[in-house]
């Protein structure tokens, strides 16, 4: 289905969401049509933020907003859907567009398998009416579903289009870029070299894939690394839990700007606990690159100031490899909680692989290594 037709049938004039590769056609259409426009399109930090933002839009306009997201974001919307939107509370109508990663019968990554199994059930359990759009779904079928949805909205309820792989198309291209010169894979190579045999917790997406391939290329064991292949935004909290319980062992966290934004409250908890053995590195390219490259707001905020405001005793930024190496060594030497923001370009190798070990194997090997320390 052409995404332009879907948007026409929906008839909404406000979209907010968190980008998803399954919804790349919609995301690119919104960027080409609106860019980031306060009146029509906002990329929020997480899916719960999107839902609350959309609720505010409805309260101000009386119109029905659209929230787009990957199905992994359903967990973030449960609270606002159940305690804010529900017709037993404020009865706020809303349309969700959900990319269906891990659909049963369709090969996908391990972090999507269970989420894919429960995607539709979770929506239905939240009393959200569902219509699934696949490659063979006709425009007329979507039109009929949308007409039914309008009746749902009139009752102060919500509905969702669940989008199967390859169901939406968009012919126009969008190129996402920034002016930074440092490449993320090389940044991670420098971090891994500085970390030596210290444990590393890496965030979801291409960062973990690149770390895995760096270990392969170096002939190193993967036991040093916990690859947070799912659970976006929680790597720093995982690293905190490890650091607090291994106080004599230095722990590294490789994070991303989109992940940090998704659950930024974790930085306040990190700062309040201030583990002396944790080095938190945020690779900031101002983009949700793993799912297509749409922008985050991180390019326009001062993450160093945020970290300092949250209680990090040390927070710096690096925009060259010389500065990065110097600041990595300084963080190792000072034995205090440190944050290093690294300014990064957008892009990755076309032949970037994926971990060849299972998530369970990764956990078991990492735990066994921690036990040795």
Image (cartoon, helix red, strand yellow):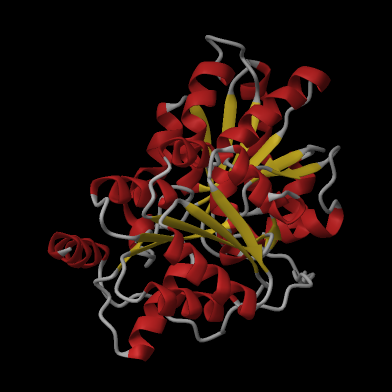
| Residue at the far top in the pictured view | 88
Residue at 83% over, 60% down: 32
> Is residue 70 positioned above or below 51 on the image?
below
Q: Position of residue 42 (x, y in %)?
A: 75, 43
Q: Quadrant of the C terminus?
A: bottom left
Which residue: 81% across, 49% down? 36
Q: Quadrant of residue 145?
A: top right
Q: Nearer the viewer, residue 349 or 113?
A: 349
> Who's the residue at 47% across and 24% down the image?
127
- Of the pair 47 and 365, the residue shown nearer to us: 365
Of 2 and 349, nearer the camera is 349
Residue that sits furthest to the front in the current view: 334
Asked if 117 appears above or below 23 in the picture, the reply is: above
Q: Is residue 239 visible?
A: yes
In terms of depth relative to the viewer, which is nearer, 53 or 128?
Answer: 53
Lateral position of residue 124 relative to residue 63, left or right: left
- The structure residue drawn at horizontal position 40% and vertical position 82%, both measured from the top left corner, is 213
């Amino acid at each position: 289905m052409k995404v332009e037709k879907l948007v026409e049938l929906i008839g909404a004039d406000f979209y907010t969401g968190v980008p998803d590769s399954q919804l790349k056609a919609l995301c690119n259409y919104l960027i080409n049509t609106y860019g980031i426009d306060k009146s029509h399109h906002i990329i929020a930090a997480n899916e719960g933020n999107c839902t609350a933002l959309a609720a505010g839009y409805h309260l101000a306009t009386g119109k029905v907003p659209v929230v787009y997201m990957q199905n992994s974001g359903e967990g973030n919307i449960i609270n606002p859907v159940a305690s804010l939107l529900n017709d037993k509370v404020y009865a706020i109508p809303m349309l969700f567009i959900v990319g269906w990663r891990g659909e049963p019968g369709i090969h996908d990554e391990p972090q999507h398998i269970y989420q894919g199994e429960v995607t539709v059930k979770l929506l239905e359990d939240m009393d959200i009416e569902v219509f699934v759009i696949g490659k063979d779904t006709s425009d007329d079928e979507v039109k009929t579903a949308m007409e039914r949805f309008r009746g749902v909205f009139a009752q102060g309820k919500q509905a969702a289009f669940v989008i199967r792989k390859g169901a939406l198309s968009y012919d126009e291209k969008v190129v996402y870029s920034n002016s930074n010169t440092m490449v993320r894979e090389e940044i991670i190579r420098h971090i891994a070299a500085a970390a030596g045999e210290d444990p590393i917790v890496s965030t979801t997406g291409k960062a973990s894939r690149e770390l895995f391939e760096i270990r392969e290329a170096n002939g190193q064991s993967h036991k040093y690394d916990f690859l947070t292949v799912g659970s976006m935004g929680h790597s720093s909290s995982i690293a905190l839990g490890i650091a607090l319980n291994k106080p004599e062992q230095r722990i590294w966290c490789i994070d991303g700007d989109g992940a940090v934004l998704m659950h930024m409250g974790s930085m306040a908890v990190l700062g309040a606990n201030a583990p002396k053995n944790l080095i938190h590195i945020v690779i900031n390219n101002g983009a949700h690159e793993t799912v297509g490259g749409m922008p985050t707001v991180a390019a326009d905020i001062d993450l160093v100031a945020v970290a300092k405001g949250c209680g990090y005793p040390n927070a710096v930024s690096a925009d060259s490899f010389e500065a990065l190496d110097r600041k990595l060594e300084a963080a190792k030497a000072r034995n205090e909680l440190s944050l290093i923001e690294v300014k990064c370009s957008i892009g990755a190798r076309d032949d970037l692989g994926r971990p060849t070990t299972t998530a369970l194997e990764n956990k078991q090997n990492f735990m066994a290594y921690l036990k040795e320390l």
